[in-house]
Amino acid sequence: MSNARLLWSSMTVSAALMLSACSQPADETTEANTDTPAAETTGQTIRIATEGAYPPFNYTNADGSLSGFDVDVANALCEQMQANCEIVAQDWDGIIPGLLAQKYDAVIAGMSITAERQEKVDFSEPYFANTMVWLSNTDGSFDPMAIQNVTLGGQRSTTPGAYLQDNYEGKDGNTVQLYDNYDNAYLDLKSGRSDAVLAEKVSAKSWLADNKEGFGIVGDEIDNNDNIAIAVRKGDGLKAEFDKALSEIRSNGELARLEQQNFGQ
């Protein structure tokens, strides 16, 4: 699908309502349905898409099942709404087009609120706030205060990817290489084909847990008001239902518990 310090507190996320963030999936050209009536979720089945390739937010297990913070949040919200959850995997570039084509009813996939996305979909209140960090070799070869003549990696259609393109592409001898997912960006970093990767802090920390030798977070976090929320079609009454359920799981401590469970902080 960030920065200077992860806002783990659910209260902080609540205070950051409706701020913009991240990037935009490609080919989001399908027109949204604006005539959808208000939702009545009790007993209904809600189809929710997630990427399944963005740990610890969402990932695919060996048996094909989906797990992660987004999946846990989706299940908690559906329980709160007394609705049935059907969670499906969808590649990132096609995730908003799939929503607009009514393949599913909502997207819970670590998706940031951006002005460009808001032209196509409605967002719930944020359920998480993100920051970006530089991930690189710890031998001192990469200096985030003097970025020149280096290759920088990131994921397409994400806040860090857009930040790289806006600030470094073709400037000071730098090259920006964007990938379909962070796994491939990290592989090129590990193999030496890139000098640093700019990623959301939780993604970087998840990768570092299994790749501690020689790599680390370098420099300060970058806080760019990256707020993650649920996407629904324009005018869909599910937005109000999700907002209400989010408020309830934030108030009863469930959202904070899920953050602790998935992020360990």
Image (cartoon, rainbow, N blue to C red):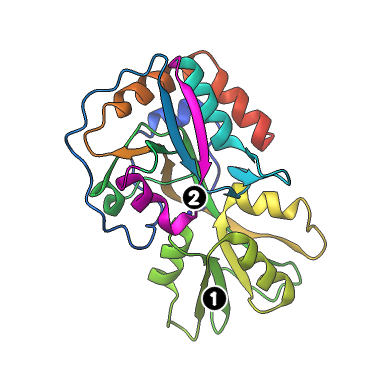
Figure quadrant of the C terminus: top right
In this picture, is 59 found above or below 123?
below
Name the image quarter holding residue 148: bottom right
Residue at the disc numbered 1: 147
Q: Secondary structure at mark 1?
A: loop
Three-letter residue code for mark 1: Ile
* Residue contact at pointers 2 and 1, CB within 8 angstroms: no
Q: Examine the structure image and report whether residue 97 is included in the region drawn in magenta.
A: yes
Residue at the disc numbered 2: 90
Q: Nearer the viewer, residue 2 or 77?
A: 77
- Residue in view at x 29 percent, y 22 percent: 39
Label at residue 62: none
Q: Secondary structure at mark 2?
A: loop
User: What's the magenta region?
Assistant: 81-102
Relative to residue 187, is residue 132 drawn left or right?
left
In this picture, is 143 found above or below 227?
below
